């Protein structure tokens, strides 16, 4: 890749110059990768949806079936509603958190980020079970309530509330981490300037800071919404009879009823929903803002309405703030934000912390508090070659995935940041597509492709599959820092005689190091916690840790799961601290 | 290795070899044994099945034939993997356990290899436990269980389960039309031997009545154990071994076998598998009564070879679906009806759940 950029064959054809100099070339390896391992498998599955399996001819029977009953449209509606509410709540909770963290001195900021990262690192299978233990009828919360004299246990689980808690808990870190880069790049002196010019603090916040942070907010909203569309474990375990999401129906069709054309049709329906959301987003904000790009200042009525709304909000907030100050005094009011944020952090971290003591339980079951303590489940874990080899494989695969995905995403981000081509928007959207397509669709399509080229049950296959999923995240993370990167530094280096490669290695990469590390960690997590692709691609002997946990969870829910979580927690926290140290020292 | 189990192993070998001679595949398998040991990858349901089957089947088979068995956990419904495996000829598994419904789906699509022995070869086997391309190893049963500490008036039938006035308590059913429809009909007074073809309208009408009283619709087997064990619900339908696990772990609960529906799981070989000969030898090996008795030490599932009860202690037999006492209270779930109607009924069930 770098040789492609560096080599300068002396061809004087105009077209040749275009080929060699155009920055979009940097995105080509990534594009090729995604075309082969993402677009092709998904297209094959969608093609199936309009095929008659018996005759191989065209058929719209699957779509006719969807239209014939209202159940699929209703499930789509439920999916839409849950995903939408999750996005809204994740923003409401993630915004103050991100705002607070962005305002901290850099050293504290990174420590606080750890608190956001840790729940992100806990396998969401384990998190879901933690919520069952917290919210259940004889769960932690209800036990506390009953102990304090409440007569009836509260219905917290197996209803919409339970699903929302699980989903929002899974998504707040994603929302906060998407908003954070935008917020840290806002110059807070602008807010002070507004106040110097006579604005109230509330007006200064809403009309200056909030407005500047909007690109991050909308990008986070879209990412959370789209990621939420594909959830299936949370609604299955925390939901009631009304909370069925589309991904659950797709999985039933693929793996139980073996009706792949119909699964393809349902997948197409989900895809259209996601694309529709993207389209609306693009119309209002412009798709490139997802990486923290500047919002094109819309003119005319919409903008005026927007400003009016903000002014009303500001006026209201100003009143409320004044009332709060009157009621509680200035000092206590100033503590509101930290208190709220620490509560959010508690919400994020508690399920993880709850799992830790359960790893040391002497009981046969996952119960809290444990009736006694022992190391037996660690013994089970370490003495099982299946568990230990799965752990090692997951670390190896995640590491390789992180390197490949960061490289692909990094070059693509560089290409898009330097390009003013009209194709950029389209290419960017294509790179984000793996987030929009439900994983089960990618996984099934990929399994077919891999089987043909002998990659099933191989580590390479897993790395490829996980890289497809991780590339959107790395691209977004690196694009975000590149937006604030001064390209004139590259030009200065070039003027001083540095080659393209030299510029990249000695100037660009050190300057965007933070984004690269964030991308690497994102990709690592994506792979390390990935289940759907692992179910299909890892098969046979080469199982990953989430797959092994999943097998165990379906079949034999015992505290080995918690013991594994403890080990992973320790290893991963160590890794994160090392990454942090490396980032600071480098 | 004690002397006794060594003899068992030898006997197992002889049975297996005899069976192969009948089927006419003995020669290649024996040659295989003499020259190169074959490694079979066997997909079992995972979890407690791994160690149980290792002790009952895998280790003895390795001892007896010199071939090696590597076991992995399969998906709950491995039909998709099976199809892809055969379509693309990438055999990640040589033998895999299938439920009756999975067997029927795969048989219809021609994805299974014949096992080359029949009921006449192993007459002690339950007649339902063998077909041309599948042999049942264990029987599981859909029953209900209740918490003895919370439900004071013990329910004894599905009619009681559906009677929320006389038998108060939080209830849970499986979020699946399979079994749920049968349970509703049994509760409505349909006799166990006259269930099929299911009267769908009548079943949904009965389900309508209990719908507001179902606190949890469970989706996974381990979840049903957790629900009973944690006290999330008081009365719950599900698979017997799941509840047995909770009871063995100290949960005060009782299983009601009356009007239970049982079904089977067993081995199949993917069509065109290059190691099919050794795989068949292995399947035949697992039909042995004493081998099957051994897995019941760990798993509360019933052996399909009823001679196994000669060596199973009476206390354990009381918790197994195929013991004489329990089996006579139950009937087999009809897979033919379900394979014909599952897709449409699932759609209706999902729609019913949402309304």
Image: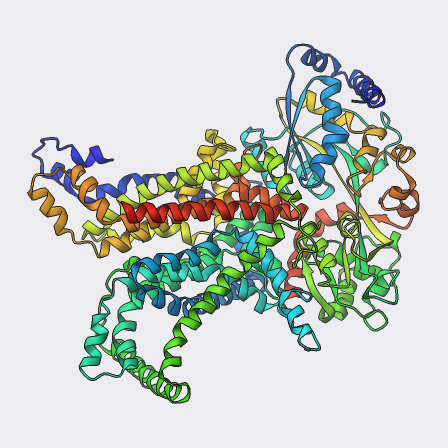
Which residue sits at x=28%, y=80%? Answer: A201
Quadrant for the N terminus of chain B, please: top right
Q: Please give the count of numbered marks on the rendered protein.
A: 0
Quadrant for the C terminus of chain B, please: bottom right
Give percent across and percent down for residue A557: 66, 49
In the displayed structure, would residue A387 be above or below residue A49?
A: above
Q: Nearer the viewer, residue B86 or A341?
A: A341
Q: Is residue A241 visible?
A: no
Q: Nearer the viewer, residue B21 or A555?
A: A555
Give percent across and percent down for residue A309: 32, 81
Give percent across and percent down for residue A565: 55, 48
Q: Is residue B210 left or right of residue A375?
A: right
Q: Nearer the viewer, residue A259 or B230?
A: B230
Q: Is residue A151 left or right of residue A15?
A: right
Which residue sits at x=40%, y=44%? Answer: A468
Q: In which quarter of the view is residue B50 placed? A: top right
Q: In which quarter of the view is residue B303 placed? A: top right
In the displayed structure, would residue A529 be above or below residue B129?
A: below
Which residue sits at x=13%, y=49%? Answer: A489
In the displayed structure, would residue B30 be above or below residue A464?
A: above
Q: Is residue A430 left or right of residue A268?
A: left
Which residue sits at x=6%, y=43%? Answer: A495
Q: Is residue A407 left or right of residue A67?
A: left
Give percent across and percent down for residue A243: 59, 64
Q: Is residue A117 visible?
A: yes
- Give the colouring mode of the picture: rainbow
């Amino acid at each position: 890749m770098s040789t492609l950029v560096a080599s300068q064959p002396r061809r004087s054809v105009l077209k040749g110059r275009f080929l060699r100099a155009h920055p979009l070339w940097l995105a080509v390896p990534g594009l090729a990768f995604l075309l082969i391992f993402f677009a092709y498998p998904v297209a094959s599955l969608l093609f199936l949806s309009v095929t008659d399996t018996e005759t191989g001819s065209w058929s719209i029977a699957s779509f006719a079936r969807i239209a014939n009953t209202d159940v699929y449209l209703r499930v789509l509606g439920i999916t839409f509603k849950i995903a939408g509410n999750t996005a809204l709540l994740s923003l409401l909770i993630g915004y103050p958190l991100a705002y607070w963290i962005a305002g901290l001195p850099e050293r504290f900021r990174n420590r606080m980020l750890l608190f956001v990262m840790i729940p992100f690192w806990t396998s969401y299978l384990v998190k879901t079970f933690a919520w069952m233990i917290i919210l259940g009828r004889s769960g932690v919360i209800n036990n506390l309530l009953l102990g304090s004299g409440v007569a009836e246990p509260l219905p917290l689980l197996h209803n919409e509330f339970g699903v929302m808690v699980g989903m929002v808990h899974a998504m707040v870190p994603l929302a906060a981490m998407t908003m954070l880069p935008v917020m840290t790049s806002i110059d807070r002196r602008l807010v002070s300037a507004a106040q110097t010019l006579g604005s109230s603090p509330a007006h200064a916040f809403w009309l200056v800071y909030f407005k500047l942070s909007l690109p991050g907010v909308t990008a986070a909203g879209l990412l959370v919404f789209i990621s939420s569309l594909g959830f299936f474990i949370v609604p299955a375990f925390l939901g009631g009879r009304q909370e069925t999401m589309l991904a659950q129906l797709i999985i039933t069709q693929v793996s139980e009823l073996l009706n792949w054309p119909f699964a393809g049709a349902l997948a197409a329906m989900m895809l259209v929903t996601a694309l529709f959301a993207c389209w609306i987003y693009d119309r209002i904000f412009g798709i490139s803002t997802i990486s923290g790009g500047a919002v094109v200042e819309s003119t005319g009525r919409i903008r005026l309405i927007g400003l009016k709304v903000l002014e009303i909000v500001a006026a209201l907030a100003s009143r409320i703030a004044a009332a709060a100050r009157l009621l509680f005094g200035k000092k206590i009011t100033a503590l509101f934000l930290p208190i709220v944020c620490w509560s959010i952090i508690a919400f994020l971290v508690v399920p993880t912390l709850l799992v830790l003591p359960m790893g040391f339980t002497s009981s046969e079951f996952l119960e809290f508090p444990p009736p006694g303590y022992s190391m037996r489940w660690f013994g089970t874990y370490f003495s099982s070659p299946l568990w230990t080899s799965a752990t090692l494989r997951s670390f190896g695969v995640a590491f390789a995935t992180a390197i490949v995905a960061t490289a692909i995403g990094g070059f693509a981000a560089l290409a898009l940041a330097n390009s003013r081509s009209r194709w950029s928007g389209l290419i960017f959207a294509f790179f984000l597509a793996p987030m929009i397509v439900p994983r089960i669709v990618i996984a099934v399509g990929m399994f077919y492709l891999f089987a043909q080229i002998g990659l099933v049950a191989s580590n390479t296959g897993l790395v490829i599959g996980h890289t497809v999923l991780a590339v959107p995240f790395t691209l977004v993370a690196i694009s975000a820092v590149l937006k604030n990167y001064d390209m004139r530094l590259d030009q200065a280096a070039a003027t001083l005689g540095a080659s393209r490669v030299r510029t990249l290695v000695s100037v660009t990469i050190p300057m965007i190091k933070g984004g690269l590390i964030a991308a690497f960690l994102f990709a690592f997590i994506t792979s390390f916690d990935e289940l759907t692709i692992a179910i299909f691609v890892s098969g046979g002997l080469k199982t990953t840790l989430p797959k092994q946990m999943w097998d165990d969870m379906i079949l034999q829910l015992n505290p080995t799961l918690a013991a594994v979580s403890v080990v992973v927690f320790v290893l991963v926290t160590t890794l994160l601290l090392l990454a942090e140290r490396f980032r600071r020292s480098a | 290795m004690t002397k006794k189990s060594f003899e068992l192993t030898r006997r197992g070998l002889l049975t297996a070899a005899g069976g192969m001679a009948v089927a006419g595949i003995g020669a290649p398998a024996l040659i295989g044994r003499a020259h190169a040991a074959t490694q079979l990858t066997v997909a079992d349901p995972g979890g407690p099945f791994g160690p149980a089957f290792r002790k009952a089947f895998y280790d003895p088979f390795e001892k007896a034939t010199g071939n090696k068995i590597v076991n992995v956990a399969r998906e709950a419904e491995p039909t998709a993997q099976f199809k892809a495996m055969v379509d693309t000829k990438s055999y990640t598994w040589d033998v895999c356990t299938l439920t009756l419904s999975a067997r029927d789906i795969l048989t219809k699509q021609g994805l299974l290899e014949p096992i080359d022995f029949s009921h006449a070869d192993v007459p002690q086997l339950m007649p339902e436990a063998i077909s041309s391309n599948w042999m049942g190893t264990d029987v599981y049963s859909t029953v209900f269980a209740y918490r003895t500490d919370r439900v004071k008036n013990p329910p004894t039938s599905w009619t009681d389960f559906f009677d929320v006035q006389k038998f108060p308590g939080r209830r849970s059913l499986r979020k699946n039309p399979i079994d749920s429809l049968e349970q509703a009909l049994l509760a409505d007074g349909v006799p166990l031997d006259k269930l099929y073809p299911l009267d769908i309208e009548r079943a949904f009408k009965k389900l309508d009545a209990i719908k507001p009283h179902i606190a949890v619709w469970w989706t996974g087997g381990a979840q049903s154990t957790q629900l009973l064990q944690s006290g999330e619900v008081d009365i719950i339908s599900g698979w017997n071994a799941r509840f047995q696990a909770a009871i063995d772990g100290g949960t005060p609960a009782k299983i009601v076998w009356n009007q239970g529906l049982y079904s089977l799981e067993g081995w199949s070989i993917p069509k065109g598998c290059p190691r099919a000969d050794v795989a068949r030898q292995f399947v035949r090996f697992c039909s042995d009564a004493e081998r099957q008795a051994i897995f019941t030490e760990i798993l509360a599932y019933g052996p399909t070879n009823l001679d196994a009860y000669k060596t199973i202690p009476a206390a354990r037999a009381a918790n197994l679906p195929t013991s004489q006492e329990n089996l006579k209270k139950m009937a087999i779930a009809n897979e033919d009806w379900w394979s014909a109607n599952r897709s449409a009924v699932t759609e209706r069930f999902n729609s019913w759940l949402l309304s």
